[in-house]
Image: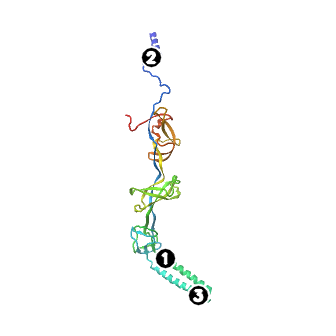
Amino acid sequence: MAAASGIAWWYQKAPASPASVSAQGGGQAPAAGAAARPVTVEVSRVQVMKLSDDVQAVGSLRSRQGVVLRPEVSGRITQLNFRDGERVRKGQLLVQLDDQLPQAQVKQSQAELSIAQANHKRNQELLAQNFVSQRSLDESAANLEVAQAKLALAQATAARLKILAPFDGIAGIRNVNVGDYLKDGTDIVNLEDIDTVYVDYRLPERFQTQVRPGQRAVVELDALPGRKFEARVQAVDPLIDANGRSIGVRASIANTQLLLRPGMFARVTTVFGVRDKARVVPEEAIVPQGGRQYVIKLVPGADKDSLVSQRVEVRVGIRRPGQVEIVDGLKEGETVVTAGQQRLQRDGSAVKVLDLRHPAN
């Protein structure tokens, strides 16, 4: 029994011969330097297209000129010389307040001025004949100046009872009627010049070096869907808002058809520049690393028709939904990886391009 157990133990521990290993299906490890399997990736080519360097914001329309007419003095309305919504001209009399008393004061002042002028002229003639003293002439000259001042005061008081249009525009809806007694500062009607309208909006402070007068802007309005209006930047506010860290911008729009009205909500796209031949890749191709931007492009391998990976640092420019401009680092027509970058750990890795038009079953 002991001998039989010893023979069995020796048989189990004995090393197997190569032939027996082969018969049992055992395999050897792959030889060193054997070719690695290509990594399957999705790719895209660097395209050239026209890109616009712009920024979008929201704002409001306002009149080129707008004012609410108010009387400077109290009085009763005797005339209203305009209709609601009517176009008026600069200098046109719109509202006349009762001016009977001021006009009477004007006539009184005119009479006093005539007397003062006659007295002064008479004293000049008498002084030339030495019939009066120089003091009498000086007193008549002073009286003449006082009379002139009183007339100017009476005329100014009467003029304040006439409300004239300060500029060409369209009258709004009036709040008063003939016969109403108005106190100074009462709203009468608004007057708007809308042949050209302004759009006021704000941009983040980082654009303060890019936006400048004369730049083009495109305005879209929710009230007029499908319509786009050309605008030009007129002014940039030199003061940056400390609360929102933004700058104010004003652009002008020609409104010859009078479709635009003050107060409308506007979506404004300010165009800083246009690049006719911008190199563009899908945004999935960008691999950020350590504050830098990289892409993995495909270059020919050692074997015929083979492709290998090469990591390239790039400088990006304008970003659009799904696309990124490449300012430096790539050329038109080069192929970049858009999916599968995480499996390409080193340059020179063999790759296989996945044809999405004929996917494998």
- For mark 2, does the 10 Å Cα neighbourhood hold few (<14), some (14 to 19), or many (20 or more) residues? few
| Res. 125 mark | 3
The kind of secondary structure element at disc 1 is: helix
Q: Residue furthest left?
A: 361
The kind of secondary structure element at disc 2 is: helix
Give the residue number, with chain letter if any, for mark 1: 157
Give the residue number, with chain letter if any, for mark 2: 19
Q: Quadrant of residue 338?
A: top left
Q: Say what amino acid the circle numbered 3 marks.
A: Glu
Q: Say what amino acid the circle numbered 1 marks.
A: Thr
Report the mark closest to the observer, 1 or 3: 3
> What quarter of the picture does the N terminus occupy?
top left
| Res. 253 mark | none
The kind of secondary structure element at disc 3 is: helix
Q: Alpha-carbon distance for marks 1 and 3?
A: 35 Å
Report the mark closest to the observer, 1 or 2: 2
Q: Earlier in the sequence, mark 1 or mark 2?
A: 2
Instruction: Please provide percent x and percent y for residue 295.
Output: 49, 40
Instruction: Please provide percent x and percent y for residue 184.
Output: 46, 72
Q: Alpha-carbon distance for marks 1 and 2?
A: 128 Å
> What colour-coding does the image apply?
rainbow
Residue closer to the observer: 103 or 342: 342
Q: Earlier in the sequence, mark 1 or mark 3?
A: 3
Residue closer to the observer: 10 or 82: 82
> What quarter of the picture does the C terminus occupy?
top left
